Image: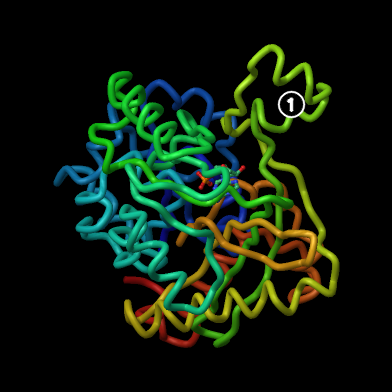
Amino acid sequence: MSIATLASHSSLQIFHGAKFEGFRTIAIVLRDRLWFYEQFRHLIDDFVILNNWRELCSPDVVGKLQSLNTILVPHGSYVEYVGLDCAERIEIPIFGLRGLFRVESDQWAKMELLRRAGIPIPRLYGVGDEVHGPVIVKLPGAKGGRGYFIARSGEEVIKGVEERVREGLIKSPRDAIVQEYLIGVTTYFHYFYSPILGRVEILGADIRYETNIDGLRRLPPDVIIEVGLKPTFVVVGNLPLVLRESLLPKVLDYGIKFVEETRRSLPPGVIGPFSLEGVIDDETNIRIFEFSGRIVAGTNLYIGGSPYSYLYWNEPMSMGRRIAREIKMAIERDELDRVVT
Ligand code: AMP
């Protein structure tokens, strides 16, 4: 049995974890990045080399992966790179819930899933609606926050969105997502749902560091206003975060609610890693503005294990290794079909 993933995003962590658990590993890699991943030859048994990501679904590549008895682990960039159609229909077992990819590509469906789960979310608006208080206007897809902006009125939303259509960042104003701007600490919670053990584990948390929103606080507010600086949200990296223990029950409750809702509306429900992304306010309310049904890049902080993964496993357990451990447990119990779709 081999574990494969696209060589990008959190792939080194996934390979590292898979090796730890005794699997063969396959890096599906772009030709011009091969030299880099070859430096990690000790983590990678086979390379499947592509000229572009869309080749993943070609019969040759799929045939090669099938012949190596592969399970594909989709990470945060998977759908963005290979496109929704290929991501969904590829004839390789996927560790995770394939049915969630389509929901994740539709921001309204995504927020509706959170709402139905009973998880608090920010107010949502359409482009053209009158807005109350500051809003953040977001563009779809995992583009690392590029093109996002803050607006204070419906007119500002329309103006900014039209600019982004002209710049080619989005095709139509309908593609933009307008949410109430939440004030507090932006936090990413990393979860793992184990169908084999029947439990949700909190495996970590992080803060994304973004330019220039996180740099602006170093300037006095009057300078920001005088110079007319506008916040942007381009991701630079991730910082580790250990949560107040009193927040953990709520964080775990949201994770359980998310799993239960996906089991109701998208059976068999989410499998393995997922992340809820939200803001914690000064009354310790948490509202969730985004989720990912896959492994997020913030888990790369914890390749040696996180403070939380130690509590469950008492050994260095990264998200990558946890994925491999689940597959291993499923194979041992002859229940592999419970963890792949
Ligand atoms: P996202 O692409 O949804 O992960 O958002 C990228 C960044 O934009 C986040 O890390 C936050 O800094 C910011 N952000 C997104 N949505 C909101 C929101 N509703 N309120 C406040 N900040 C947000």
44 and 245: which one is in front? 245
Q: Residue furthest left?
A: 59
Residue in view at x 21 percent, y 60 percent: 91
Task: Tell me the amino acid under the disc marked 1.
Answer: Leu
224 and 18: which one is in front? 224
Q: Quadrant of the C terminus?
A: bottom left
Q: Quadrant of the N terminus?
A: bottom left
Residue in view at x 25 percent, y 49 percent: 84
Is 232 situated left or right of 245 in this image? left
| Residue at the spot of label 1 | 216
- Residue 222 locus on image (x, y percent): 79, 21
Is 135 situated left or right of 207 in this image? left
- Residue 306 locus on image (x, y percent): 77, 60
In the rendered image of this protein, does residue 141 appear above or below residue 244? above
- Displayed-image quarter of ligand 1: top right
Is 316 situated left or right of 147 in this image? right
- Residue 55 locus on image (x, y percent): 22, 37
Visible residue check, residue 216: yes
- Residue 314 locus on image (x, y percent): 80, 72
Number of numbered discs = 1
Residue in view at x 54 percent, y 65 percent: 323
Visible residue check, residue 11: no
Q: How is the image coloured?
A: rainbow
Residue in view at x 57 percent, y 62 percent: 288
Q: Is disc 1 placed on a helix, strand or loop?
A: helix
Q: Residue furthest top?
A: 227
